[in-house]
Image (spheres, grey):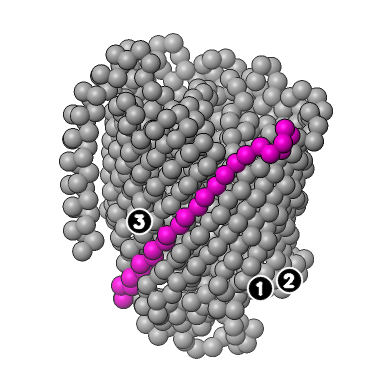
Amino acid sequence: MKATFRRHGMLFFLVLVFATTICGSTAYGESLELENPRIDTQASEASGETYPMRELFLFEEVPIVISAAKREQPITESPSSISVITAEDIRRSGATTIADLLRRVPGLDVLRITPSDANISARGFNESNNNQMLLLIDGRSAYVDFFGIVVWDDLPIVLEEIDRIEIIRGPGSALYGANAFSGVINIITKTPEKAQGTTLSAIVGEFDTYRWTFMNANVIDKWSYKVVASWDEANSFEDRDKNDHEMFKGNALVKYEFDPESRIYVSAGVNDGDGNTLTRVSGFERDGTFGYAKLNYDYGSWKFQTFYNLIDIDVVAEGDTEERSIINNVFDFELQHSFDPKEKHSITWGVNYRHNRVTSHEIIGRDEQEDLFSLFIQDQYKMLDDLTLTAGIRFDSHPLTGTHFSPRASLVYEPWKEHIFRASVARAFRNPSFVESFLDLNIDGAVIANGNRDLDAEEITSFELGYQTRLLDNKLQFKLDTFYNILDEIIEFRQPDFLLPPPPPPFIFDYENQGKAVAYGGEASLQYHFSDRLSGYINYAYQELEARDDGVQFQLNEDGERIDSSPQHKINAGIYAELENGLNGSVDLNFVDNVTFGFFDPDSAPLPFQPTLVELDEYTRVDARIGYKFPNRDVEASLIVQNALDDAHEEFPTGETFQRQVLFQVRGKF
């Protein structure tokens, strides 16, 4: 069934590609003759699909962000620690996946397990199956409710269509609710106005890597559209003859603008294919469909959004012979409004309803569903010309964990021009996933894993201090952020009889709220724009994690002991240069300190599935790219070498060993 869907889905998109290429090229040519083609200049405060028409070239002006306050503001006024990756940054880099692109962000932990399985967290506690980071794509939450995770390599978008990525480090539940525990990543794709024309991209390289991308967009009077289609496949790093993943990605958007204050747009997308995922329970092969459909209507300062997420996949766990089905349906409705009741106040409020329904009889038994309600309000109050207070609170309800209140307060102070200080405090939470609450899994009688309906939500209280400055006509940017986080009710996957002598099979696991921990540290970043053709950056992150109860982190840490699963030191650095003759290149360095992971080792002796500590060495990954932009054409050819120093390393004990990879890319816009 899924293979048939994949073939028919690909055929549909190929037909759509052909039609839009022919129709779009004619209409696009007509639009060039207009004296004033329609350009969308309205900022979107909720969905992020449109925003002021500014050319956000690196360091030339202060970027505008929307994720930190759900409304447009300069990055210097953000109440949160935030970083921005622009489309130009993406083009300049040698990254070929979103996860690898995010490695350069200070304070993010990126963990790649296989070519099709990556995990990302902010400020510690990264592990396989990480479920503490909220991902938004144009305002749509894109995490998998069944597991509570983001399957980064199965997102129905490609790098070529991304306009910017806004990364918030620190709790965001005051605006975004449950999964905004350690941070929020908001991917904002190009509007049809910005993507006008036809973009083609091809990547080929080692390990049988092939990636083809097509994007066409156009504006025709009040109508505009965008269509994207892509094919991606690659083999394993450890076995060059073994397929790791094959997947088709596609999405489409149609927008109609009634007037400058009112617009409606409809979008839909799909990722269909196979890959690998490692969870706390087991590693498994996945095969199936991730899809969505979304409707947005903006009327002035009112924003309405509704979307539907579908996950329909089959999984086979390692060591298991049974194929198990997962179907997850999500219906989400959100209304948001912003207004300025007084001269110095800017208020944003909203309501949200989310309905989750899952069917997976082989994993959780009977069908389960959840109805989630929330309400938030935030006020930005300019107390003085140089002092702004942002205060907000969100109310969330959950059928199992009850009600949660997530407050946040932040002060931004600019005593001297371009010298900005920030202090903030926030609380956030993470609800248990369907797996953590309802799991009922038996793998060939050897492993039994059970959920726990009585779990409490994980909680975090965060204190932050920050400083940033922009000097020398914005050529130099420096940021410093520090944090102290208190985590409580940490949900752990554990063996109830761990302290007893190891029992014979079956090995039994469940989920429990295992206690407290603290995390503290900071990030410092420096970016400098030497000239129009030369720029560079360097950043450093330090973090410490300590257990405040026995049994945290796979039952291996005692009260007061350091948790070593997150690197203590991380360094990123890079430089980009472009010559007048069209030659350009970049070098990016990513250093990650040694770590010690705790996990249940299926191959441990004398009995398998015992809590095990494995230390992984530090590694230095260097990605290099050299490109050539053809004169008088928007076409560029690039040679990309990832892990150029061939520092072979594992990023998780049961993950693959990553090696050097050489790729060739051609990208053009017509």
Q: Earlier in the sequence, mark 3 or mark 1?
A: 3
Determine whether 634 is above or below 442 in the image.
above
Q: Which residue is mark 3?
A: 290
Is residue 330 highlighted in magenta?
A: yes
Image mark for residue 474: none
Q: What amino acid is at disc 3? A: Phe
Segment colored magenta:
322-345
Q: Position of residue 226 (x, y in %)?
A: 32, 35
Q: Residue at x 35, y 67 (%)?
A: 327
Q: Earlier in the sequence, mark 3 or mark 2?
A: 3
Q: Position of residue 406 (x, y in %)?
A: 67, 58
Q: Residue at x 53, y 65 (%)?
A: 372
Quote the CA–CA distance across marks 3 and 2.
38 Å
The answer to whether the residue labelled 1 contacts the one labelled 2, judged by CB atoms less than 8 Å apart, is yes
Q: Note whether residue 445 is visible.
A: yes
Quote the CA–CA distance across marks 1 and 2.
8 Å
Residue sitting nearer the eye, 300 or 461: 300
Q: What amino acid is at disc 1? A: Gln
Q: Which residue is mark 2?
A: 549
Q: Which residue is mark 1?
A: 514
Determine whether 39 is above or below 304 in the image.
above
Residue sitting nearer the eye, 614 or 103: 103
Classify residue 510 by image quadrant: bottom right
